[in-house]
Image (cartoon, rainbow, N blue to C red):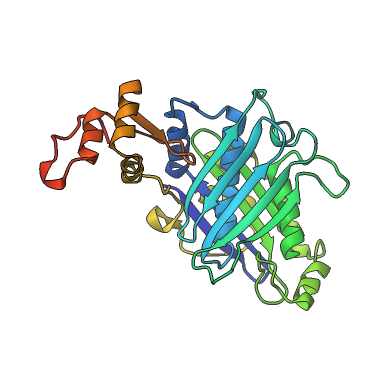
Amino acid sequence: MSELHKFLFDGMPVRGMIVRLTEAWQEILARRASNTSTGAYPTPVAELLGEMTAAATLMQANIKFNGALILQIFGDGPVKVAVAEVKPDLSLRATAKVVGELASDAHLPEMVNVSNKGRCAITLDPKDKLPGQQPYQGVVPLHGDSGEKLGRLSEVLQHYMLQSEQLDTTLVLAADDKVAAGLLIQRLPVKGEANLEGTAAGDRNQANEDQIGHNEDYNRISILASTLTRDELLTLDVETILRRLFWEEKLLRFEPQSGMLGPHFACTCGRERVAQMIRGLGVEEAEGILVERGDIEVGCDFCGKQYRFDAVDVAQLFTAPGDQLPASPVMQ
């Protein structure tokens, strides 16, 4: 199962997390691959989207926020936009819109930052909004302070965390067609908790900023974390990774989160929601589509799953409850 592990370094102002998305990530890819209109994601897009999903999970788990965290990458390349959304219960979903051809070995700049105008946005959307309350959004470019294109998502997000929280952060991300995984190492804030919403007091921000790059414990652990390779992150279990990287450190481990308490796929689409939409079309329009196409097929704009309704299914939608027709043999 997909799993999230949190840990602290005993006696040091450093925390860490590892996420491994397995069946949750495979469900995202399977839904997209089964969509007859779009087909599967190209390999570079799938890897970028997997890294985004792992990173969004780590960031959601790293803050106390009752709402959705939405990570977006957008620009002027073949990948118009890529989105990963993670809710407080660690339910997640992700999607990407591909509008052009891209090389099999394309990286972040070639996919979304051709003219160096690409952006990364992180949105915090409260679950229970107050009247007039708007989601908080932070946006950073896909280039460094000197305008150089950043080649990896991890570099973009590390830059974001420095700007938004004034905290040193190390991210190692990787994804293939089976696993999306990430390791996060972060220096703890000097005073109180880091606040991704940007509402921290000025003196606390200044204290955190003054520590950037100067904490020797964090610097040492960051160097160790950065030695983790893509293959190791994708193939090794969490216990092995922690033992290999930090065998000389004393870790304080939290109970791993898995199953419905850990990262898991969830999308708001569903067959009943599509059925309600078809009912909203009315009998005449629905029957007109059936005459033209033979069935009604609707795909979720977010996850890509397709829902098919044949003539029997549509007839049932407009039949009174006491007069239901025999169920369609089409798989639900």
Pick the front one: 276 or 73: 276
Q: Is residue 159 visible?
A: yes
Looking at the image, residue 122 sits to the left or right of residue 324; the answer is right
Looking at the image, residue 26 sits to the left or right of residue 188; the answer is left
To which quarter of the image does residue 311 belong?
A: top left
Pick the front one: 315 or 188: 315
Looking at the image, residue 114 sits to the left or right of residue 304; the answer is right
Q: How many marks?
A: 0
Residue 305 placement (x, y as % from top left): 41, 36
Residue sitting farthest toward the front: 284
Q: Residue at x 29, y 30 (%)?
A: 287
Residue 284 placement (x, y as % from top left): 30, 33
Pick the front one: 12 or 26: 26
Residue 225 placement (x, y as % from top left): 67, 51
**Image quarter in which the C terminus is found:** top left
Q: Residue at x 65, y 66 (%)?
A: 197
Q: Is residue 226 visible?
A: no
Residue 118 placement (x, y as % from top left): 74, 41
Pick the front one: 52 or 330: 330
